[in-house]
């Protein structure tokens, strides 16, 4: 058997799960919704909730299919080959996708006369996927497959992302409001000329959420520091500035502080296990100085906030002299904002923590999800090309290190947040598409990132292009494509 690949293992296990549910509940539709609790949250349309007994029944059937070492047949299709006769037997979500895209290719997989399609490759036999776990959760269940953790292939540990689950439910309601469920419905709205209204509704929902967060902060008069944390390409800077405007409109004087200005000089940055400078670790920050500055500010003393020069990798000689008053709230933005060691010696009653990230995204269809880390990767490719003169190959080269840092320094703390804000926009991949494609096609076949570039290009082919002229200047998306009210590229 080839080297373990968690993605391929997961997708093949998903086919086994779909087959098992089809055997037991042939008239119900399965929907893979989002990543949750170290797995994927799954619901079954037609069932208000899935009982523990039903989950065990599904899992038993999966084990039977795996034990029989069933062959998985792959049939390559393109949308050109799909006839009207085929369309009559296809799920509505897939039918809408096929009718609203150009020529696309995909794989139809058959397991014991059950067929569905995937855009990535699966194993050719069920015998390779004998590790999985299901348990009831909310209206559906969590589906878990193994990952390689510290060199050991194992099912990830049990966690309960209570706050994230709430965000996912809210996002689902937002999509209902916008009448967009999968990529096909987004394409239909775009082709019908109604995309401007969808963008306005989506952006208004973002603004309404920021208003609600502002009101929550102002309800507690003890709050003096708001920390904002999130992984790369979440839109932290735009969100911080929009929150600042909302606070100012409520007669609050916000003071913006970026954790980036507290980096130690580059020659003092810690080295990781691969001998490279680790800019993601909290030890790369001058925490002692940050703590002192925050304590002094809380006592309404005058403080010099450092300014970091990223070109030289050194702190500038002079920083900014600041002092706060009773109606000031400090906004502290950076990836470590949820780590309690960031702010020592200050009562937690004075601190309000916000976690932001691109947490949800439209699925291609009911069975094929788009990982939100892929959307952040696209955002990063576009921003790097515009603001840092990095090509897509450079961005992809560093991405695995960025993701590793997030897993270590950000994700373990996300449930510490008082509130979670989802920065994703239902329409954004359609806007990002031309710029991402322009960068990805430059990657040559000899590159180690060529296969990844092809996969991203294949994904983008499912989306119709949406003009960036419809995106408001204050949108989080403008932080990445340029033209932001808060940025000067």
Image (cartoon, rainbow, N blue to C red):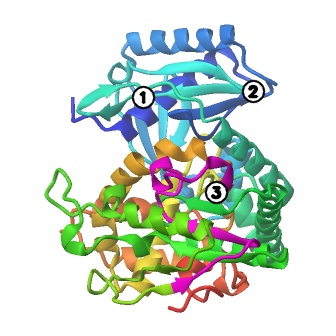
Disc 2 crowd, CA 10 A, few/some/many (<14, 14-19, 20+): some
The residue under label 1 is 156
Q: Position of residue 348 (x, y in %)?
A: 62, 48
Quarter placement of the N terminus? top left
Residue that appears at 50% across and 48% down: 340
CA distance separating discs 2 and 3: 30 Å
Of residue 436 and residue 72, the one placed in the foreground of this image is 436
Q: Position of residue 38 (x, y in %)?
A: 50, 34
Q: Which mark is residue 199?
A: none
Residue 170 part of the magenta-drawn span: no
Image-based side of 121 in relation to 106, left or right? left
CA distance separating discs 1 and 2: 22 Å
Q: Is residue 478 above or below residue 402?
A: below
Determine the secondary structure under disc 3: helix
CA distance separating discs 3 and 1: 35 Å
Of residue 327 and residue 457, the one placed in the foreground of this image is 327
Residue 328 part of the magenta-drawn span: yes
Of residue 460 and residue 397, the one placed in the foreground of this image is 397
* Among the two numbered marks 2 and 3 on one chain, the one whose residue lies closer to the N terminus: 3
The residue under label 3 is 98
Badge nearest the viewer, 1 or 2:
1
Q: Which mark is residue 139?
A: 2
Residue 420 is at least partly visible in this image: no
Residue that appears at 56% across and 67% down: 332
Determine the secondary structure under disc 1: loop
Marker count (numbered) = 3
* Among the two numbered marks 3 and 1 on one chain, the one whose residue lies closer to the N terminus: 3
Q: Are marks 2 and 3 in contact (CB under 8 Å)?
A: no
Residue 129 occupies which quadrant of the picture?
top left
* Among the two numbered marks 1 and 2 on one chain, the one whose residue lies closer to the N terminus: 2
Of residue 461 and residue 274, the one placed in the foreground of this image is 274
Q: Which range is magenta?
A: 321-350
């Amino acid at each position: 058997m080839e080297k373990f690949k968690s993605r391929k293992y997961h997708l093949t296990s998903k086919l086994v799960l779909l087959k098992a549910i089809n055997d037991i509940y042939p008239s119900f539709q399965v929907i893979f919704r989002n990543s949750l609790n170290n797995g994927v949250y799954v619901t079954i349309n037609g069932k208000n909730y899935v009982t523990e007994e039903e989950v065990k029944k599904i899992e038993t059937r999966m084990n039977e299919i795996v034990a029989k070492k069933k062959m998985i047949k792959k049939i390559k299709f393109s949308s050109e080959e799909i006839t009207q006769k085929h369309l009559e037997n296809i799920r509505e979500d897939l039918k809408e996708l096929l009718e609203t895209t150009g020529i696309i290719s995909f794989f139809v997989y058959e397991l014991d006369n059950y067929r569905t399609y995937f855009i990535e490759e699966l194993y050719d036999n069920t015998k390779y996927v004998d590790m999985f776990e299901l348990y009831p959760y909310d209206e559906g269940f969590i589906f878990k497959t193994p990952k390689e953790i510290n060199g050991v292939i194992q099912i990830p540990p049990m966690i309960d992302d209570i706050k994230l689950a709430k965000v996912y439910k809210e996002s689902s309601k937002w999509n209902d409001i916008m009448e967009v469920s999968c990529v096909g419905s987004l394409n239909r709205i775009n082709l019908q000329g109604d995309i401007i209204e969808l963008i306005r509704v989506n952006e208004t929902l973002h603004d309404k959420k920021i208003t609600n967060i502002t009101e929550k902060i102002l309800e507690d008069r003890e709050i003096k520091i708001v920390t904002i944390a999130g992984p790369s390409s979440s839109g932290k800077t735009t969100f911080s500035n929009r929150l600042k405007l909302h606070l100012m409109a409520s007669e609050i004087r916000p003071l913006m502080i970026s954790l980036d200005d507290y980096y130690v000089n580059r020659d003092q940055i810690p080295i990781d296990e691969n001998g490279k400078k680790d800019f993601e670790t909290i030890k790369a920050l001058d925490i002692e100085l940050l703590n002192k500055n925050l304590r002094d500010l809380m006592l309404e003393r005058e403080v010099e906030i450092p300014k970091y020069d990223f070109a030289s990798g050194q702190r500038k000689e002079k920083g900014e002299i600041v002092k706060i008053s009773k109606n000031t709230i400090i906004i502290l933005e950076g990836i470590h904002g949820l780590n309690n060691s960031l702010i020592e010696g200050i009562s937690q009653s004075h601190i309000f923590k916000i976690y932001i990230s691109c947490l949800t995204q439209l699925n291609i269809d009911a069975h094929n999800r788009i990982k939100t880390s892929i959307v952040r990767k696209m955002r990063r490719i576009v921003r790097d090309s515009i603001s840092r003169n990095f090509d897509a190959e450079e961005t992809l080269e560093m991405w695995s290190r960025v993701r590793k840092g997030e897993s270590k320094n950000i994700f373990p703390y996300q449930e510490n947040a008082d509130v979670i804000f989802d920065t994703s926009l239902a329409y954004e991949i359609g806007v990002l598409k031309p710029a991402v494609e322009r960068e990805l096609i430059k990657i040559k076949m000899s590159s180690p990132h060529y296969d990844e570039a092809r996969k991203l290009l294949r994904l983008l082919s499912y989306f119709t292009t949406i003009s960036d002229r419809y995106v408001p200047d204050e949108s989080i998306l403008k932080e990445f494509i340029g033209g932001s009210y808060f940025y000067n590229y």
